[in-house]
């Protein structure tokens, strides 16, 4: 359930909401379909769960469709994901054949909807080949890349580019992810919904309750990383950092994560994480259900500092979520984290467990600095990474894409 757009005026001002309505008036009734590969788990599902209802509230005929496949399909697309983020992965022919065949099957299932849609937004590589099955499409098709493509393994991008090249436009989170393509490229950063269960204000009792719920020690400062169990999120590096902090400063660590139905590697990474944590009573590995939004909200609020020690990161909604709660973030110096963590202002950018440990110890010792950074972090999100800005940019893109032949677009 999303809030009524009018409720956001208290946060961003009436003008912003009026502007959104004016823009949306030009797109009223348009059929817009978003397609990705999982209904829950990970940032894309998180965003679509409110982006689509907001577009409906603004008068667009918006829908969200999910493609499905078998084990080999997800293995292939996870390899693509890893490859696009720089890992040298294998691309055996039988997996590529499954990938393309799965997309053809999904295209048939979605044929009537996608043929007639005015706009189709295809998220990430999993459904990228769908376009090939719609030579007689009516609307504009836009590929939205959520992945850190700053240094892709070339073989993977070369293969996927053949699908992406035919889209009418593409959207990227950061300029240095964008690859050369013969269509308009848009930069749109993701965002969070400040009134959702994951981000809304909580009573102090609701926050304090997490200590009981998860057997945490109320007398120890808490540091937290919320993430799928994925190697690029570097959960083992977080445990290493925790150990280095603990040598000097009492602290407890929460690594909270769940799976995503399109991520087959999560279980293996979770096993490695549990092994690395051993039987340390102050390391809490929480495997949360997909709808644990309130719990994540409370854990982030109960934390002194949040970590996101990724080695690659498309954007890092977890960073935005923590910053919105007034927490400085100590994040990997990479991808979308750099857009949010302004080094020494809204948190610290780090490259090693040692760096992360040093910064956590510094902030735990300098509580005034911690508070001040947390406030700056919240302001940065307020001004840049809320749903209203995201919607405005999507609507602008749609309007601009419709006006393909005019040279000047008046908004
Ligand atoms: N998330 C969640 N439960 C978990 C782990 C993550 O709800 O167990 C959410 C998290 O709060 C965030 C999103 O999933 O909203 C992850 O997005 P992010 O951009 O940080 O990373 P991604 O998983 O897309 O790589």
Image (cartoon, grey):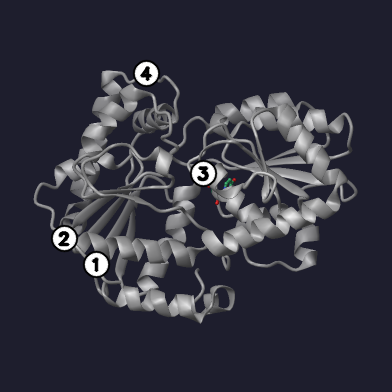
Camera-side residue of 76 and 302: 302
Which circle's residue, 4 or 3, is located before the other in the chain?
4
**Is the CB of the residue bearing disc 3 within 8 angstroms of ligand 1?**
yes
User: Marks 4 and 2: CB-CB under 8 Å?
Assistant: no
Q: Nearer the viewer, residue 74 or 330?
A: 330
Mark 3 lies on a secondary structure that is: helix
Mark identifier at residue 336: 3
Dot in front, 2 or 3? 3
Residue depicted at x 26% and y 34%: 161
> How dense is the environment of label 3, judged by Cα within 10 Å: few (below 14), some, or many (20 and up)?
many
Gap between marks 1 and 2 measured at Cα: 25 Å
On screen, residue 216 versus residue 126, left or right, reads right
Which of 388 and 186 lies nearest the eye of the viewer? Answer: 186
Q: Quadrant of residue 139?
A: bottom left
| Residue 391 quadrant | bottom left
Q: Position of residue 399 (x, y in %)?
A: 26, 65
Q: Give the image location of residue 192, x and y in percent.
A: 53, 59
Contact flag, marks 1 and 3 (Cβ < 8 Å): no
Disc 1 target residue = 409
Distance from Cα at disc 4 to Cα at disc 2: 37 Å
Residue placed under numbered mark 4 in the picture: 90
Q: Which quadrant is home to the C terminus? A: bottom left
Callout in the foreground (1, 2): 1
Q: Does the Cβ of the disc 4 residue fall within 8 Å of ligand 1?
A: no
Q: Secondary structure at mark 2?
A: helix
């Amino acid at each position: 359930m999303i809030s009524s757009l009018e409720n956001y005026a208290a946060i961003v001002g009436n003008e912003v909401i009026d502007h959104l309505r004016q823009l949306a008036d030009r797109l009223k009734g348009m059929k817009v379909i978003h397609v990705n590969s999982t209904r829950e788990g990970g940032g894309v599902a998180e965003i679509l769960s409110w982006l689509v209802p907001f577009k409906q509230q603004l008068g667009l005929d918006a829908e969200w469709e999910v493609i499905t496949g078998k084990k080999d399909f997800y293995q292939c697309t996870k390899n693509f994901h890893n490859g696009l983020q720089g890992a040298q992965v294998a691309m055996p022919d039988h997996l590529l054949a499954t990938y393309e065949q799965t997309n053809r099957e999904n295209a048939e299932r979605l044929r009537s909807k996608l043929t007639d849609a005015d706009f189709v937004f295809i998220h990430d590589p999993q459904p990228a080949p769908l376009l090939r099955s719609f030579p007689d499409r009516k609307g504009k098709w836009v590929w939205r890349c959520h992945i850190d493509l700053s240094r892709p393994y070339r073989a993977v991008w070369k293969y996927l580019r053949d699908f992406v090249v035919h889209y009418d436009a593409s959207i990227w989170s950061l300029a240095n992810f964008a690859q050369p393509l013969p269509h308009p490229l848009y930069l749109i950063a993701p965002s969070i919904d400040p009134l959702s269960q994951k981000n809304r204000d909580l009573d102090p009792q609701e926050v304090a309750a997490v200590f009981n719920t998860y057997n945490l020690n109320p007398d120890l400062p808490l540091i937290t990383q919320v993430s799928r169990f994925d190697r690029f999120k570097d959960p083992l590096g977080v445990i290493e950092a925790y150990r280095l902090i603990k040598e000097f400063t009492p602290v407890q660590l929460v690594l909270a994560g769940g799976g995503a139905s399109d991520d087959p590697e999560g279980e293996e990474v979770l096993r490695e994480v549990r092994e690395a944590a051993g039987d340390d009573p102050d390391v809490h590995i929480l495997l949360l259900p997909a709808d644990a939004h309130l719990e994540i909200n409370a854990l982030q609020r109960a934390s002194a500092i949040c970590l996101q020690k990724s080695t690659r990161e498309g954007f890092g909604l977890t960073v935005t979520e923590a910053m919105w709660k007034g927490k400085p973030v100590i994040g990997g110096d990479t991808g979308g984290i750099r857009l949010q963590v302004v080094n020494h202002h809204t948190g610290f950018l780090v490259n090693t467990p040692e760096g992360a440990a040093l910064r956590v110890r510094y902030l735990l010792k300098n509580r005034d600095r911690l508070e001040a950074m947390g406030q700056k972090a919240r302001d940065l999100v307020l001004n840049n990474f809320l749903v209203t800005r995201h919607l405005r940019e999507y609507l602008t893109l749609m309007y601009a894409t419709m006006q393909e032949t005019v040279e000047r677009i008046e908004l």
